[in-house]
Amino acid sequence: TKYLLNDACVILNKPLVSGSIEGFEGQVAVFNFMDGPTYRCLFPEPPAKENTSDCNTIGVTTTLPLIVGNIQANEAVKIISGIGEVLSGKVLLVNMLNNSFVTLNVKTDQKNKNIATIEKRNDFTNCSKPEISGISFSEFSTKKNEFWLLDVRNETEHAAFNIGGKNIPVYELDALMEELPTEEKILTYCNEGMVAKQAALLISRKKNLKVYYLNSPLSQLTNS
């Protein structure tokens, strides 16, 4: 998508305020502004599909999109108002693990300024969310023998009350994926259902397994 946007901006002579996020790191730059470098001057060609990662698998810290998005908005304001120093010919690297902001220079390659047509591509990375299904308390009551249960709460909560199955806290789940069965339907559960859903999403992204989550509060089971 970045290359499509870049090439369209070059053809239309419009600036491109670019932002990228991955994990705890982000990048912000303004391309094709006042005869400055384009995105292809920094990254001439898209990487091979086998060398790219699914954005659902990589993940991103929740605070980073807000930070990078605000910087992008600020660059747009400077472009529109004509005041301040725009991030043209530069790329700002943001690292939230060490709170660093580093600016690198980008050189212009004139051959990337002569784009006349949009290149047709069919190798875009699919970032659609995996489909998972929630199971209600009533459905669980009639089908509970069909599922391998996974309690994703902490050990203290599990010891106080559980409906069976294995206990792997959600914060340990990523490192303990190999302990999950491969031939059974997995049903995650927690106190309210939200953490169970996140655990089910994590499993579906990491493993090609049949996974569901209990979307009813666990209190319904304790009071039944």
Image (spheres, helix red, strand yellow):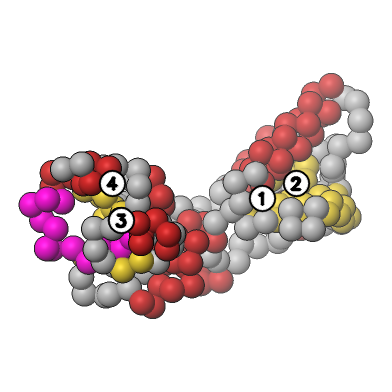
Q: Residue 59, position in %: x, y?
A: 54, 56
Camera-side residue of 116 and 122: 122
Q: Which of marks 3 and 1 is nearer the N terminus?
A: 1
Please state if 173 lies on the left or on the right of 29 as rendered.
Answer: left
Give the SS element for disc 1.
strand
The answer to whether mark 4 and mark 1 are in CB contact below 8 A is: no
Residue ID for mark 2: 28
Residue ID for mark 3: 161
Please state if 29 lies on the left or on the right of 189 as rendered.
Answer: right
The answer to whether mark 3 and mark 4 are in CB contact below 8 A is: yes
Q: Which of marks 4 and 2 is nearer the N terminus?
A: 2
Amino acid type at mark 1: Ser
Residue 134: tell me if it is visible.
no
Amino acid type at mark 2: Val
Residue at 86% over, 48% down: 89
Q: Give the range drawn in magenta.
A: 140-151
